Structure formats: structure tokens, C-alpha cells
Amino acid sequence: MQYKNIFKTWLILFFISFITPLLAQNITPGTVWLDTDGKPINAHGGGILYQKGKYYWYGEFKGQGPNGAKAMDGVSCYSSKDLVRWKNEGIVLKMVPDTNIMLQPGCIVERPKVIYSAKTDKYIMWFHHELKDQGYKAAMTGLAIADKATGPFQYIKSIRPHQNIWPINLPQQSRVVPSSFPANFRQLPNWKERVEEGVLVGRDFNTGQMSRDMTLFVDDDGTGYHIASSEDNQTLHVSKLSDDYQSFTNEYYRILNGQSNEAPAVIKHEGKYYMIASGTTGWKPNPGRSFVADKITGPWQILGDPVIGTEADKATTFQSQSTFIIPVQGKKNSYVYMGDRWNADNLGDSRYIWLPLTFENNKPQLKWLNSWNPKKMPSN
Ligand code: DGJ
């Protein structure tokens, strides 16, 4: 009798763990998302690469526990053909157990994004990198390269981009390197105007520009761009990458100056560039933002909050923060918003909010769905 019960319990657990993920057809935002081994998917602040019939989802592999470094093991990768069932491909970028190497255990890696270079047949990952025991002070972007989408990625370098280079669109009169910088800068009455004018670019001119939340975007002509929160997270920088995507060119632009955007995600839709981003409130969600531009380098125009829902939904972007927009393959103008519902007390247990991103009057929109099937997504 007891054996019978044990067998029954075992059968139920087996079914939940292994059969349910295999049968899944739908995405159910905010619930625990199991991979094809029946384990919760651990790929936060992620991005997607589509290559040869498969989607690859790269993200932060977070451990259990609160904040920063302790919650970080490396970059994970999952693969899928349908955006619903994801196979764990393992940790594809690992911390290097060597204190001489910047990518050592205890450092922070966030928002990894991967693009493929047809020119070199390499997979190029850039990621936000903070150094061990320095909190979010270093503000660097890191590079890792692989021969296969599933890695292993080899760590190359971390940099503060554009050292001693002015942004293309910074007016001549703002190209000033201050001899000193006031410690109480944010208490100055006109600090915001001075940020908009570019004073922080001058401050960081000799060391290179800050680079925190970031994304990558490859345009139709194959040009790659790195888009990151810079200048104390006040202004985004759009940087043109080299032909092989492995370095920064000297061409970069400030956009949405002083507007404090994080978590940028970019797509090209009907010839225009659209961006979804968030404000800067740490792990707490805030109202989403959307923008449009004729050129990725700007100027960008504000379109407002993409959320269609209650005031509470709007205030928190359905309790999520953007990380990427997936162009659905084989469906024209069909996109998926990818967001993170962070759990600051246990980052490893943060959830995913994936919803169709649609367009109404040339404006991106997000509506809540409890459960939805990417195969049945509308085209715009
Ligand atoms: C918000 C950013 O978007 C995240 O990637 C992360 O850096 C947290 N801040 C840290 O507080």
C-alpha cells in the first residue's frame, strides 16, 4: 500500500517535471518557467539570437540570495525552436578563477547580448561588467567570443568605451574636460541641465565613458551597434561597432540626454527604429517608456508608456523591466517583449514577463495575457 502511494507520488512528480515542459504550447508570464529537463530557466536580463532555425536565449545565471555579485555565476544559454520549450545548453560564459582576470568570481555580469558575425563566423557577446568588490562603480562593457552559439565563450576584455573621443553629436562648446568635478554635483541647482549639455562626458573623457545596462542591435546592412546607459545612467550612448563587432569605432552618439533610461531594447519596424526602456529604480519596476527614430543614432522621439492596462499595470510595466524584443521568425512584424520581474531578495527566483508587442497607430503596445501561444501571434 505504502509502495503504491510512493509510486503514485513519483509518477505525478515525473509528469510535472518532465512531461509538462515537453507538452507546453503556451507562455505563461510570471510563473516559474521550466526548461525541457523540468528545471526553472535561469537566464535573467537576457537577449535572444536567432540562428539556423533556433532561438538562443542568453541571460544572467543568478544564484540564490539578494543583490549583485553573490547572485552571479556566469551567462547561461537555452535553445528553442518555438520560444516555449527551452533546452538548457549550460553556462556558456564562466567566471575565471584567477584574481588577475577581471571576469573573476564575485564580479557582476548583467544583460549579456549575443550577435553573429557572418564576416568572421563568430558569435560575439557583449555584457555589462562590474568588477569584484566595487559595486556598480566600474561601469564597463565586456567582450566574449565563441565559435558556436552554444559556446563556450572565451572572455576577451572589458572596457570603458571611447576613451579620449567626443560623441559625434556633442556640440563644440560642450567639449570640455573639467580640471576637477564637484563631489556634491547633484546638489547643484542646474545639475540636470549640465548633464543634458554633456558635462559628464567631459568628466569621463580621459577614462572612457561609463557603460551599464546595454543591448546590441544589427541593422539591415550588417552594421552592429552597442546601446548602453552611460553618464551615471542619465544618457544613453549609441556606439557603432567595428565590422567584426569585436571593438568600438570612434563613432558614438548621445541620445535622450539626461532622461535616465535603462534596460534598452531595440527593433526595426517598417523602416523605423523603436526602443523600449525603463527608468532607473534599481530592481524595482517603473513605468515603461517607448521611443521612435528614423536613424538609430537619433534623434529619438518620445512615444510614451507602451502599457495598455490599469494604473497599477502602467506604474510597473506589469511588474517587469524590459530586456529585449524578439522579432518572431516567419511572421512579419511580429514581436515579443521580454521583461524581467526581479525578486531583489532572491534574484535567482526572478520571473519572466514575455508578452506580444503590437503596434497601434505606429506606437508599440503591451497588453497583459495570462497565457498565450507564440504560434498564434498576430502580425502587425
Ligand atoms: C537596474 C538594471 O536595469 C539592472 O540590470 C541591474 O543593474 C539593477 N539596476 C541593479 O540594481
Image (cartoon, rainbow, N blue to C red):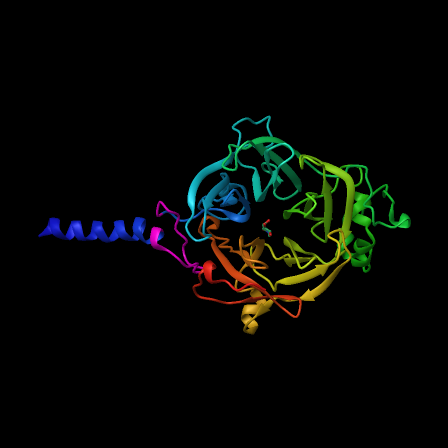
Taking depth in this image into account, of 132 and 340 the one nearest to the observer is 340
Query: Which image quarter: residue 162?
Result: top right
Left/right of residue 231 with respect to residue 28 in the rendered view: right
Residue at image position (71%, 49%) is 232
Left/right of residue 84 with respect to residue 253 in the rendered view: left
Left/right of residue 194 with respect to residue 214 in the rendered view: right
Counting from the top left corner in percent of width and height, residue 207 is at: 76, 37
Left/right of residue 23 with respect to residue 341 in the rendered view: left
Q: Is residue 12 magenta?
A: no
Residue at image position (44%, 66%) is 370
Counting from the top left corner in percent of width and height, residue 106 is at: 53, 36
How many numbered discs, if any?
0
Q: Residue furthest left?
A: 1
Counting from the top left corner in percent of width and height, residue 18 is at: 31, 48
Query: Which image quarter: residue 221?
Result: top right
Residue at image position (50%, 67%) is 368
> Which SS does the magenta portion mostly show?
loop
- In the displayed structure, would residue 95 be above or below residue 324? above
Taking depth in this image into account, of 128 and 345 the one nearest to the observer is 128
- In the displayed structure, would residue 53 be above or below residue 196? above
Residue range in magenta is 22-38
